[in-house]
Amino acid sequence: MDRVITYRGFEIHVTLTPSGEDLYEVTMQIKGDHKLSIIGERGEVVKLRHGPFTRRWAYLIGEVAGQAAIDVLRGASAATSGS
């Protein structure tokens, strides 16, 4: 199961992989800007820890983790300005 969330000019790709009955492991990938090379290989998939999660929580956690990473890339001042 995949979902793409647009956030501040980037795309957060969240992928769920079934790991049990109604439980999923979650990975996320950020695409969309040259600044991604600052934190590692461009387009790297990140497996989120402390799973498995229910489907609803998995998507939420993937989205929030992606947004936090993008906020770090854009800088703290840009994150608090609401842009």
Image (cartoon, grey):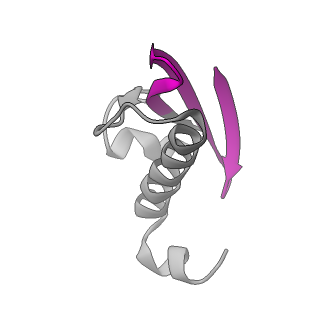
Which range is magenta?
A: 1-28
Q: Position of residue 41 (x, y in %)?
A: 35, 29
In-front residue for pair 9/49:
49
Please tell me whether residue 19 belongs to the stretch shown in magenta: yes
Up/down of 83 relative to 2, above or below = below
Q: Position of residue 38 (x, y in %)?
A: 34, 46
Q: Position of residue 74 (x, y in %)?
A: 49, 63
In-front residue for pair 53/75:
53
Point 49% across, 16% down: residue: 18
In-front residue for pair 70/23:
23
How many marks can you see? 0
Magenta stretch: dominant secondary structure: strand
Seen in the image, is 38 located left or right of residue 75?
Answer: left
Q: Single out the residue that lies furthest toward the front.
A: 21
Seen in the image, is 81 located left or right of residue 20?
Answer: right
In the picture, the quarter occupied by the C terminus is bottom right
In the picture, the quarter occupied by the N terminus is top right
Up/down of 15 relative to 40, above or below = above
Point 31% across, 36% down: residue: 40
Point 54% across, 24% down: residue: 22
Seen in the image, is 55 located left or right of residue 45?
Answer: right
Seen in the image, is 32 located left or right of residue 34?
Answer: right
Please tell me whether residue 30 belongs to the stretch shown in magenta: no
Q: Position of residue 64 (x, y in %)?
A: 51, 54
Point 64% across, 79% down: residue: 82
